[in-house]
Image: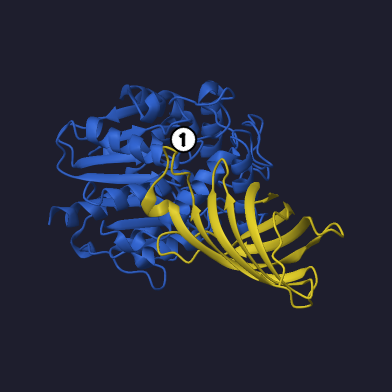
Amino acid sequence: MQLGLLMPFGVTGTMMFTKNDHPEWDVDLTWEPSNYLQSYSVGGAYHPFKGAFFVGARIREMQLHAPWSRGYDPHFDNQLGIGPEIGFRGWFDKGQRWLGSVSVGAIYIPSDNTLLPVLYTLNVGLAYRAFKHAN
Amino acid sequence: MQILRVSPLTLGVLITSLCLTATSGCGPGVKEPAIDLDSQTSPMATDFSSETDVEARYPTQILPFYMSGKAGTFAGQTGVSINYRVFTVPNEVGAIVLLPGRTEPILKFAETIQDLTRQGFSVYAMDHRGQGASGRMLSNPEIGYVEFFKDYISDVDTFVQTIVRATLHPHLFLLAHSMGGGISGMYLYEHPDVFEAVALSSPMFQINTAPFPAGLAADLSLTDCGFSNGQSYAIGQADFDPAQKFTDAGNDVTRSQARYNVKMQMFADNPTQRLGGVSYHWLCESLTATSHVQTVGGASTTPTLIFKAGNDDIVVTSAADAYCHAASQCQIVTYADAYHEVLSERDPPNTNAMNCFL
C-alpha cells in the first residue's frame, strides 16, 4: 500500500530480485484509484549500490476521469504516461518481512490531444513480503 | 460569400467597442483569415458606447435596454437551471451567441450587447451554470464549481439547438470571453459547422496558475480532487469581495475605472449574481479540459479571431498563439497594454484597432 501526492492511495505488488540477499532489480504492478485520476502502471527499478537506493521508470495508463463517472470521455481521458522515479526501498526488519519505500517521480504525457504539464509524484509505501523464493 | 462580407463587420463592431488603446496587429506566424477585408465598410468608433459617460448612461439607458431583452431559462445537464436573455433585432444582419467568462453574468455585458444590437445583430446571451443567474450547485453559492467541464459544453449546445436555432438567422456568430472561450474551443471541436465565424476574447486555453508553477498547481489540485470531492475553495481563493477597489492589486482585469465601477455597482445591486474564487474541483476540470483545448486548434475550420491582452494575468496567452497557429483560419489581435477583460477595457484614443484590421 502506498500514500502520496498526485495519487493519494495505491496498491502495489512488487517482485524484488536479489543477489547475495541484496536488492538488485524490482518490478511492480501498481493500481492507484482515486476520486479523480486513475492510474494503472508498471514500474521497473535498479538498485545500483545493492542497497535501498533505486532509480527506475514507470509507464502508466492514466484516466483523467474515472470510467464510471459521467464526465468520462474515452477519447480524451485515456492517456499514456511515462516518467522516471528515484527513491529508497528497503527492509524494515531483519527478518525481511516489511518493506518500506519512499520515492519521487515525474509523469510526462506524450499525447496529441492533451497538453498537461509534467506532473510530479511523491509516494510513501509499506509492503509485506508474501513469499520468498530461495536461489 | 455572405460570410466574407459579414464577418469583418462583426469583428469591427467588436474591436471598436472593445475600447482599446493599442494593438500590435496580427501576431507573427499567425495565419491571415480567409476574409476579404478590402471589400468591407466598418463602423466608426463613434458608433459605439463611450467609456466617458458609461456610468451615467448605465442606469438610464444601458440597464433599461438590457431589461428589455427576453429572459428565459432552460434545464441544463442534470437539470441545473440555465439563465439566458435574447435581444432580437428586426431584419437582423445575423445573430451572435455571447458566452461570458468565469464569474461574469451576462448582465455585465449589457453595454456590449447594446452595441452589437445597434449594428443590426440579434444577441443570444447565456449564463454558464454555477454563475450569473443560472443555478448554483454548492451550498456556498459563491464557490466557483462545475462537476464536469463538459456540462458547460452540453449547456451551450442545448442553448444553441433549442433557443438560438428556434429562429432562422441569416448568419450565426459566436463571441466568447475567457472561460467562455475555453468552452467554445471544445464546442467548436465537437460542432464545427454551427457558427460561421467566432471571436474569442482572452480565451481560457490555459489557466495562469502563477505564483504556482503549472505542474505544481496541477499536482495540488489533482491530489485534492483525488482525495476529496474538491468542493472547497482552492488555496488562496475566497468569496467575492464587494469592497475591492479599482486600484487594488486584485484588479487585474481592466484599466477602465468607469467600466470597473459599473461592474461593481452591478454586483452591489445584484448580490445573488456574485461569484467568488474557484474550487479545487473546478480547477481540476478546467486544467484537464484546457489541456485538451490547446490541442484541438488544428481541427478548427471555423474562421476565428482572437483578442489577446498584452497584460493578461488570468490566462496564459501563448496558448492562444499555439491554437491560432494550428487553426486553418485564425487571426490574433494583441492589445499591448490591455488587461484580461478586453471587452471591458478603456476606449481607444483613435481607431488604431480598426485600422489594423480593415
Q: Nearer the viewer, residue B139 or B248?
A: B139
Q: Give the colour of chain A.
A: yellow
Considering only vertical position in the picture, is B85 above or below A127?
Answer: above
Q: Nearer the viewer, residue B177 or A63?
A: A63
Which element carries disc 1, helix, strand or loop? helix
Residue drawn at point x = 30 percent, y = 60 percent: B299
Q: Is residue A108 visible?
A: no
**Residue B107 in picture, x, y percent from top left:** 43, 30
Residue assigned mark 1: B54
The residue sitting at the right extreme is: A94
Considering only vertical position in the picture, is A33 above or below B26?
Answer: above
**Residue B51 in picture, x, y percent from top left:** 47, 41
Residue drawn at point x = 46 percent, y = 58 percent: A79
Q: Amino acid at mark 1?
A: Val
Q: Give the colour of chain B.
A: blue
Residue drawn at point x = 66 percent, y = 57 percent: A121
Residue drawn at point x = 37 percent, y = 63 percent: B324
B244 vs B346, left or right, is: right
**Residue B108 in picture, x, y percent from top left:** 45, 33
Considering only vertical position in the picture, is B45 above or below B262?
Answer: below
Q: Nearer the viewer, residue B180 or B19?
A: B180
The residue sitting at the left extreme is: B1
B186 vs A96, left or right, is: left
